[in-house]
Image: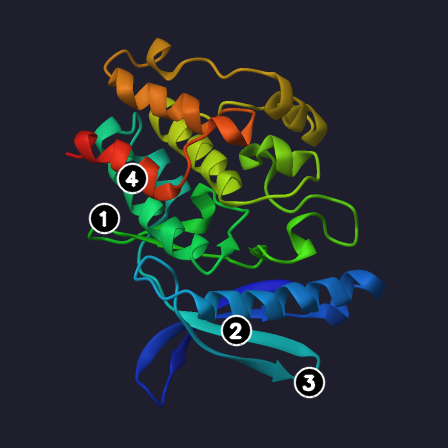
Amino acid sequence: MGQVWTAYDQRLDRRVAVKLLRPDRVAGQEAEELRRRFVRECRVTAQVDHPGLVTVHDAGSESDDLFLVMQHVDGIDLAEHIERNRPYPWQWAVSVAAQLCAVLCAVHAVPIVHRDLKPRNVMVKPDGTLTVLDLGVASVMDTDSTRLTHTGFPIGSPAYMAPEQAMGGAVGPYTDLYALGILLYELLSGNVPFDGATVLGVLHSHLYENPIPVRSKRPEIPEPLEALVNRLLAKDPQHRPDSAQDVYEALVPLLP
């Protein structure tokens, strides 16, 4: 249904990544939804110009297949980087979060909400800089698509899904900030704050459970950093930081 390949652009002498979508492999309305989301990914990714976001080179179709040609990113995804570096140094976690804030500032200015920020969608390059992938579920904020797909299910990954997202409510930049809080918590503690045997169990935890304080697991983590994580994970969006820029400014004094 969907695959990503490493390819070689002979004309421009460079490696590229090609995302291939085959809507014919699924039936009915689901195929049309895949087509719409694929076209949306092409468009919204092309709208954001930031070195921390993957660059789109080309897009088109071949028979029934749709393709998106993107910048090839050398490195490993953040999930693997976490596994290789347990326990993840809190100073590194601060650097990661600060870089992601810079990307989110650019994304939110379009205005777009990413809606699926998670370690698998972040590449760590050999020099330590990050590239954010997959705006395929991104939503332009001035449309009704900020709410639900036609299937009635919220878009995103359950472990990183904000309470308002889990409830099928309107999303905004504050939704990405919650996901950033989940990601930062995972970097600091080694695990996501809310887990469960079922998707519904995870979503219930997002709505009603409080995370275990990260300093109870790692006392060396600075108190201001723990306080920032707690603000990002507030159930009520109004209690979260106002913007990715505000989060970045809170992280600056903690940068290594």
Q: Which element is circle 3 on? A: loop
Q: Which residue is mark 2?
A: 68
Foreground residue, 152 or 30? 152
Cβ atoms at labels 3 and 2 below 8 Å apart: no
Q: Which residue is mark 3?
A: 63
Residue pictured at 67% horizontal, 23% vertical: 204
Q: Image quarter for residue 67?
A: bottom right
Measured in 3D between alpha carbons, the distance from the residue under mark 3 to the one under mark 1, in whole angstroms, is 39 Å
- 41 w.r.t. 242: above or below: below
In the rendered structure, which amino acid carries the disc numbered 3?
A: Ser
Residue pictured at 29% horizontal, 39% vertical: 248
In the picture, the disc for residue 248 is 4
Measured in 3D between alpha carbons, the distance from the residue under mark 2 to the one under mark 1, in whole angstroms, is 26 Å
Q: Which element is circle 1 on? A: loop
Front label number (4 vs 2): 4
* Residue 72 screen position, x and y as percent: 37, 67
Residue pictured at 58% horizontal, 36% vertical: 161
Front label number (4 vs 1): 4
Q: Image quarter for residue 191?
A: top left
* Residue 229 screen position, x and y as percent: 39, 25
Q: Which residue is mark 1?
A: 128
Residue pictured at 63% horizontal, 18% vertical: 208
Q: Is residue 17 visible?
A: no
